[in-house]
Image (spheres, coloured by chain):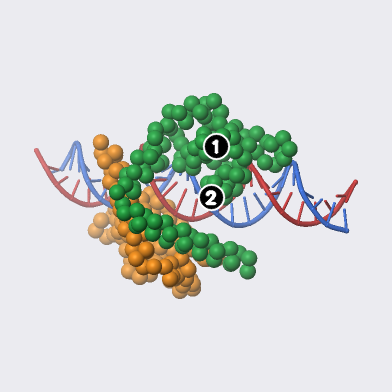
Chain colours: A orange, B green, C red, D blue
Amino acid sequence: MEAALRPYDLGATQWYVLHRLAHDGPTMQRDLLRALQVERATLSVVVGTLVRKGLIEQVPDRVDQRQKLLRMTRAGVRLWDKLPDLSFIHKTAFDGIDSADIAAAIRVLRTATERLENYSRQGADT
Amino acid sequence: MEAALRPYDLGATQWYVLHRLAHDGPTMQRDLLRALQVERATLSVVVGTLVRKGLIEQVPDRVDQRQKLLRMTRAGVRLWDKLPDLSFIHKTAFDGIDSADIAAAIRVLRTATERLENYSRQGADT
DNA sequence: ACATCATTGTTAGGTGGCTAACAATACCAG
DNA sequence: CTGGTATTGTTAGCCACCTAACAATGATGT
């Protein structure tokens, strides 16, 4: 994915942000947090990069000045339209694999992730 | 894993290097490369960090001065012996999960990884 | 013997992840 | 209305990953 995006000077996370904005329209930065499953600080830096490149803009909400709305700029839309279709990555990785196996893999990984997250939370509180 | 190691000022990759040296004895840096599945440059930095901390030493091979042998120092062994057992992580994540599911997950991930690696290599050569 | 190629390691520069500490704003309780 | 708390975003500093370019050494072929 990063190899495919390198010619456009985008990283994978930057792509995900653009993807969200392209598909769901303007979005609050705090909502992106949940969508991308990333820490506040991390997103802040990625957003900063995209703003610096002029691909998105960040406007404080009228009523709650803490929250910031993210929106693609004209240049952002232009770039987005030029980007290649990345679905070949998913196809290359998973096409033709037994779908029961894939379901099992998802189960295993989801379960392990949840358990480790619970474990961490416990440790943090105690 | 990183949370467990933080009190000892170690990252996960640093731990893996120590683990290798503790279990297999002194090792050529280039062999570690394959073992850790990491790029040359990445390992170089990690090794540099461990050397700076005085936990391992790096000595050029007598006959081939390009290659460097990594070996734990006395301080490295002392620290290694103090580190907690990390097997609770694997247990927390996977204990009790259907072993057929786990096997399937491994199959899926290994296959996908190989396919993507092949794909990348193709693109690089062509 | 020497020029060329291959291998090994390092450095520089970039991405993306994290935590900790801080600033600004909003909310709420007395 | 004011003081404490919660939310949101930023900054700084770290780890780990990558590629590209370079330096040093060793191997090879003419």
Q: What's the residue at 42%, 68% (across, down)?
A: A97
- The chain containing the residue under callout 2 comes to B
Position of B28 compared to A2: left or right? right
Asked if the residue at tag 2 contacts the one at tag 1, i.e. Cβ–Cβ closer than 8 Å, the answer is: no
Viewer-proximal residue among C26 and B55: B55
Which residue is tagged 1?
B24
Image coords of residue A1 (percent x, y): 48, 63
Q: Amino acid at mark 2?
A: Gln
Image coords of residue A42 (percent x, y): 40, 51
Q: What's the residue at 47%, 71% (across, down)?
A: A88
**Element on which disc 2 rests:** loop
In the figure, B101 relative to B64: above or below? Answer: below
Q: What's the residue at 60%, 48% (across, down)?
A: B40
In the figure, A95 relative to A64: above or below? Answer: below
Q: Amino acid at mark 1?
A: Asp
Image coords of residue A105 (percent x, y): 36, 59
**Mark number, residue B37:** 2
Viewer-proximal residue among A25 and A117: A117
Quadrant of res A96: bottom left
Viewer-proximal residue among B34 and A55: B34
For the residues beneath circles 1 and 2, the answer to whether they share a chain is: yes
- The chain containing the residue under callout 1 comes to B
Real-space Cα separation, disc 1 to disc 2, in angstroms: 17 Å
